[in-house]
């Protein structure tokens, strides 16, 4: 644990060109990793389900980029970009996806359901919103110990209807905890559209019910996500309490690889394709002469090589031995 | 050594652990300046301050979930449910998060959830729950259920120091009815170890919580009126069960009665009976008997409550039947 009142190590609020390029790199890396997971799934090499974050990259990357080293990340299943920004290795990501014995959960759980205290990443569980009170508890501990750490937690449009969302957010507000909750509003909770999930105009309006600021932003604009989350993180760090940030995005693929998403109107997908977060940021960086074909090509090669290495490494890694299935239920 | 009530011993255990370790804190409803619905935390707020004796919103899921989160990063919370009944509202946090964290993440989750449990107080269907069996089925949890002031303090200290989520069932019926000697200072009762509360060679009663006192009373009656010597085994910990003590006691006496205040069907007594059948069948001189609450909610009216819950009279009758088998 860092000593109390450690100064926060965060990026500057106005990003340099190198940092803006880094946002681009992480978004592309996240998408390519997701695509690699889908390929493995279709090859029958993923033991369970596969979940992607296509369309959500700007939200995941831009938000996590606003955190400092001493902060905590409680991501969701479409936030691979946030794991990567935090410094998680691709090998660990793929070991988890494939349920290998060397994975962070030692094969006890899959996907992003791991914890890595060295990076202060605490993954999600399948019961959406259940981690919100837990994340609030980490924020409480941080406040009690005067650590100067902020906890960033994510939920979806569907998950924001679960009781734990309300109990956790209310407690964080009442106790004025250093907590930022991001609602990734991607229009569908599995097959159920927003119109059948909630009657609120905006999900950020729920913030008012808890006496905290709520803001709704375009979740496909990575710089806007960064700047908004950065303000929320600074506010939390300075004792201002929680903020609710709703990022409006689109889930561009099915809930899982087993879902063809035939219930999504094709016109809706076409419309959102125009707002693809990676292409949008690519256009901005190109116009600003930060990115060109050569740099883009180099980034692509670097990503390709890194994923090839990680996939090969994970595939070559054995499953955990069956004999250890009963180990670790209890701490010694 | 000091004589104190059961609830004073619980408080003494928490107090000493808070003095010893600054990472221990309390969180719950009305536990601060008010001192808790049963006054278990009276004086804590004044002594330790509001940062370590935290009044929470009415929000069991948030209390338990936040405790799990704080525990994950090295704190040692003691969460209070105002009544064990209300843990239903935080059930998901216990079974989905706290219980599975170590298996999935290999991280300690040192937290205690206090559950004021049980009936005999005319609390009705929502203030009388004995719901330990729901959690007995959940790998990753530990469950303790002390019956005496000495055990209450020692198990509280052990629960706080354990690196796993521990559900601490405490019995409202015993809070101020039971007084006893409690050792001073750091005397811990190991989790997982039961205790023979009365020696006897004819029949064994296996029980825990308030029912220990009914069993002891029944054993006294049988010794005096029938000349039958009953061994009373107080499990003290329900998860993990002290299987060795259970089996040894059955082998020593050949007849066994299992008693618990919780409802019969799906109760912990069923598991104890199965363990005995598996490991000590050859030592049995009579069928395994169980006394438990009727399979009903706990009713409000005294006549109904008495009918539903186990008591000394029912235990005496069952012991006499067993002794004649």
Image (spheres, rainbow, N blue to C red):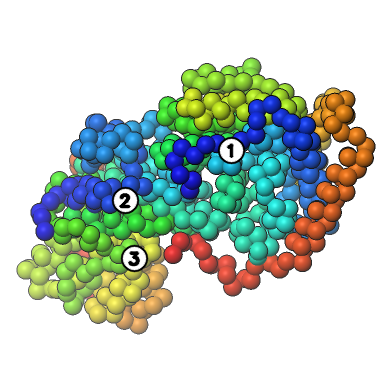
Q: Point out which mark residue B21 bears.
A: 2
Residue linked to disc 1: A9
Residue sitting at x 57%, y 52%: A118
Assess whether mark 2 and mark 1 are in contact (beta carbons under 8 angstroms). Answer: no
Pick out the residue farthest to the bottom.
B282
Q: Residues within 10 Å of mark 1 (few under 14, many from 20)?
A: few
Tell me if I can see residue B307 in this picture. Answer: no
Residue sitting at x 48%, y 48%: A1
Residue linked to disc 3: B192
Chain containing the residue with disc 3: B
Chain containing the residue with disc 1: A
Q: How crowded is mark 3: few (under 14 residues within 10 Å), some or many (20 or more)?
A: some
Q: Which of A328 and B23 is in front in this view?
A: B23
Q: Residues within 10 Å of mark 2 (few under 14, many from 20)?
A: few
Q: Nearer the viewer, residue A64 or B267?
A: A64
Q: Is residue A118 above or below residue B122?
A: below
The reply, left or right, for residue A208 in relation to residue B75 is right
Numbered label tally: 3
Q: Of helix, strand and loop, which one carries label 1?
A: loop
Q: Distance between the residues labelled 1 and 2?
A: 30 Å
Whether labels 1 and 3 share one chain:
no
Circle 2 or circle 3, nearest the eye: 2
Q: In which quarter of the image is the N terminus of chain B?
A: bottom left
Q: Distance between the residues labelled 1 and 3?
A: 45 Å
């Amino acid at each position: 644990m860092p000593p109390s009142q450690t100064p926060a190590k965060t990026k500057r609020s106005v990003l340099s060109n190198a940092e803006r390029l880094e946002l681009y790199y992480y978004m592309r890396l996240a998408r390519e990793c997701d695509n690699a997971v889908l390929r493995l799934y279709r090859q029958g090499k993923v033991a369970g389900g596969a979940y992607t974050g296509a369309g959500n990259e700007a939200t995941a990357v831009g938000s996590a980029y606003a955190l400092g080293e001493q902060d905590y990340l409680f991501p969701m299943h479409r936030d691979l970009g946030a794991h990567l920004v935090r410094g998680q290795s691709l090998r660990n990501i793929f070991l988890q996806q494939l349920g290998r014995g060397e994975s962070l959960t030692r094969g006890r759980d899959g996907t992003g359901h791991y914890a890595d205290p060295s990076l202060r990443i605490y993954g999600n569980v399948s019961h959406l919103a259940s981690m919100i009170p837990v994340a609030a508890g980490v924020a409480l501990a941080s406040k009690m110990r005067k650590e100067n750490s902020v906890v960033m937690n994510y939920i979806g449009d569907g998950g924001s209807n679960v009781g734990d969302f309300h109990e956790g957010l209310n407690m964080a507000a009442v106790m004025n905890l250093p907590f930022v909750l991001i609602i990734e509003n991607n229009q569908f909770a599995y097959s159920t559209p927003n119109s059948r999930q909630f009657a609120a105009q905006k999900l950020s309006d729920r913030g008012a019910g808890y006496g905290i600021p709520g803001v709704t932003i375009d979740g496909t604009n990575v710089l806007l996500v960064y700047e908004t989350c950065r303000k929320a993180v600074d506010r939390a760090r300075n004792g201002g309490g929680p903020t609710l940030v709703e990022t409006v995005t689109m889930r561009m693929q099915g809930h899982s690889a087993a879902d063809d998403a035939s219930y999504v109107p094709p016109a809706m997908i076409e419309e959102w394709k125009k707002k693809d977060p990676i292409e949008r940021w690519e256009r901005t960086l190109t116009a600003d002469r930060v990115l060109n074909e050569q740099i883009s090509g180099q980034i692509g090669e670097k990503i390709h090589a890194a994923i090839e290495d990680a996939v090969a490494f994970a595939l070559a890694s054995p499953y955990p031995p069956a004999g250890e299935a009963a180990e670790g239920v209890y701490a010694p | 050594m000091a004589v104190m009530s059961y609830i004073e011993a619980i408080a003494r255990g928490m107090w000493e652990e808070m003095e010893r370790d600054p990472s221990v804190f309390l969180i719950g409803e009305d536990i601060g300046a008010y001192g808790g619905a049963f006054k278990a935390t009276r004086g804590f707020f004044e002594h330790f301050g509001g940062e370590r004796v935290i009044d929470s919103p009415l929000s069991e899921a948030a209390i338990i979930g936040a405790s799990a989160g704080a525990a994950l990063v090295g704190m040692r919370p003691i969460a209070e449910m105002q009544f064990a009944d209300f843990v239903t509202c935080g059930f998901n946090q216990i079974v989905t998060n706290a219980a599975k964290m170590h298996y999935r993440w290999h991280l300690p989750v040192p937290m205690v959830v206090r559950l004021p449990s049980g009936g005999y107080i005319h609390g009705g269907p929502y203030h009388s729950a004995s719901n330990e069996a729901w959690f007995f089925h959940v790998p990753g949890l530990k469950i303790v259920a002390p019956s005496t002031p000495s055990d209450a303090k020692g198990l509280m200290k052990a629960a706080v120091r354990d690196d796993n989520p521990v559900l601490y069932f405490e019995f409202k019926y015993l809070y101020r009815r039971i007084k006893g000697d409690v050792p001073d200072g750091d005397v811990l009762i190991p989790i997982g170890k039961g205790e023979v509360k009365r020696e006897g060679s004819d029949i064994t009663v296996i029980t825990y919580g308030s029912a220990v006192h009914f069993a002891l009373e029944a054993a006294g009656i049988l010794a005096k009126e029938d000349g039958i010597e009953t061994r009373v085994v107080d499990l003290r910990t329900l998860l993990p069960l002290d299987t060795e003590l259970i089996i040894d006691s059955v082998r020593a006496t050949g007849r066994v009665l299992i008693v618990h205040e919780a409802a019969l069907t799906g109760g912990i007594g069923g598991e104890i009976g199965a363990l005995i059948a598996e490991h000590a069948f050859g030592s049995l001189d009579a069928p395994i008997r169980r006394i438990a609450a009727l399979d009903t909610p706990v009713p409000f009216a005294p006549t109904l409550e008495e009918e539903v819950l186990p008591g000394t009279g029912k235990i005496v009758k069952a012991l006499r039947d067993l002794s004649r088998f």
